[in-house]
Amino acid sequence: KSFAVFLTLQIMASDSSPSDMFQGEESGNRFKEDVKLAPRTVYLGCSVIDMRELDTTTGTLHVEFYLYARWIDPYMIGMDSSRGFNRSGAQYETLWNPKLEVNNGVSMELLLGPDAAWNFKNAETGEMKYTQRYRGRITVENDLKRFPFDKAQVRICIGCEFYGADKVVLERDETVSLYSDTLKHKLADWEVDRNSISVVISDKIVTSVKKYSNYTYVVPVARKYMFYVWKVLLINVMMLVWSWAVFWMDPENIGDRMSLTLTLYLAAVAFLFVISDKLPRVDFLTIMDKIMLLVFVLLFLSAFESFVVFVAPNSARYSIDYVARIAFPFCTITSLLYYCLRAILFVRWDTPAKVWPRRDEREKYAVQNAFPVVP
């Protein structure tokens, strides 16, 4: 097929004048007719070089990365300088390209011009390569309900701006490594899981009949939670444990018992105000919020228990304190194990990979409709 196309172009070139041998618009115009036959495959690769300023409140991240795209343009087979193609940026801009965009980009900046971005790789096969360097902010998915044991997925979602999946299919370029040695990040509170970097090929369904092929580069990151464990959770647990001393105090000393509990309660409230700027402001309870709320509830219940013991008959006072000595530590330990260990040990990444359409599916579609499969 390549030889036949090449021969056809040679014949056409022999009948053309030197001034009109190369017409870049021809590649784009002819593609508009070809896309009616079968989708063209564009192979993508991504290399992240910098990540910083992850804002979980707004759900955005500053990122800088390279995007590599290559495809076969049959109308560029045999094209060279003798036919008027001088590989200039102006000529490259007239050629067909998949019109790629960052779907989840908030404010993306393109750093490479046409002369640096385009590359006519092989005149025999018509292979084209487009490299672009992006810099800006993208949206990030983050499950703050598990804060501070939460993880996030930095997704760079690439799609075609105009062409649907019936015209252009995006696939991963196996020649581009998923892991980049140049990756540098300034995420002080986050740890990048380099071993779990992956690529997801999927379809974005806009309408019942319109689909767009998407290429998503996924970089998992996890929050460094030990700061919150040592400086927030541990201090609250220590205050809670100290409140259990009232269960060993004389039931008649209601003033001393209430004074100790109230002092610890006020200390917990003051501590909450101190660390408020470290907590995400969301309209739901995170794991940290639930543990803090647990501390306040148990402090309140310990004060209520002191009042119950004070008004209870003498025969039942020591029995109530004895039950509280067991119930309060048990409730605290089980709650901490449930919230903390469950979040640490049982959180898994949810990255369902869906590849559509696969190469065999496109060939089957082409055979059924008597269309040629463009490489």
Image: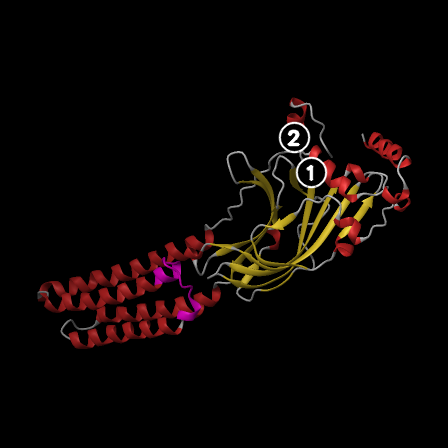
Question: Toward which corner of the image does residue 339 lie, by quadrant?
Answer: bottom left
The quarter of the image holding the C terminus is top right
Place of residue 97 in the rendered image (x, y in percent of width and height, measured from the top left) = 71, 45
The residue drawn where x is 69% and y is 60% is 111
Question: Toward which corner of the image does residue 173 lie, by quadrant?
Answer: top right
Place of residue 260 in the rendered image (x, y in percent of width and height, measured from the top left) = 24, 75
The residue drawn where x is 75% and y is 47% is 94
Q: Residue furthest left?
A: 313
Nearer-the-camera pick, 137 or 94: 94
Q: Amino acid at mark 1?
A: Thr
Q: Amino acid at mark 2?
A: Arg
222 in relation to 28, above or below: below
The residue drawn where x is 81% and y is 46% is 121
Q: Which residues are magenta?
A: 276-291
Nearer-the-camera pick, 285 or 35: 35
Cα distance between the residues tagged 1 and 2: 10 Å
List the residue tagged with mark 1: 41
Question: Toward which corner of the image does residue 362 lie, by quadrant?
Answer: top right
Q: Is residue 277 magenta?
A: yes
Helix, strand or loop at label 2? It is helix
262 in relation to 192, above or below: below
Place of residue 262 in the rendered image (x, y in percent of width and height, measured from the top left) = 24, 74
Nearer-the-camera pick, 323 or 344: 344
- The answer to whether the residue labelled 1 contacts the one labelled 2, judged by CB atoms less than 8 Å apart, is yes
List the residue tagged with mark 2: 362
Could you tell whether 249 is left or right of 127 in the image?
left
Counting residues from the N terminus, which is met first, the one under dot 1 or under dot 2?
1
Few, some or many residues within 10 Å of mark 2 (<14, 14–19, 20+): some
The quarter of the image holding the N terminus is top right
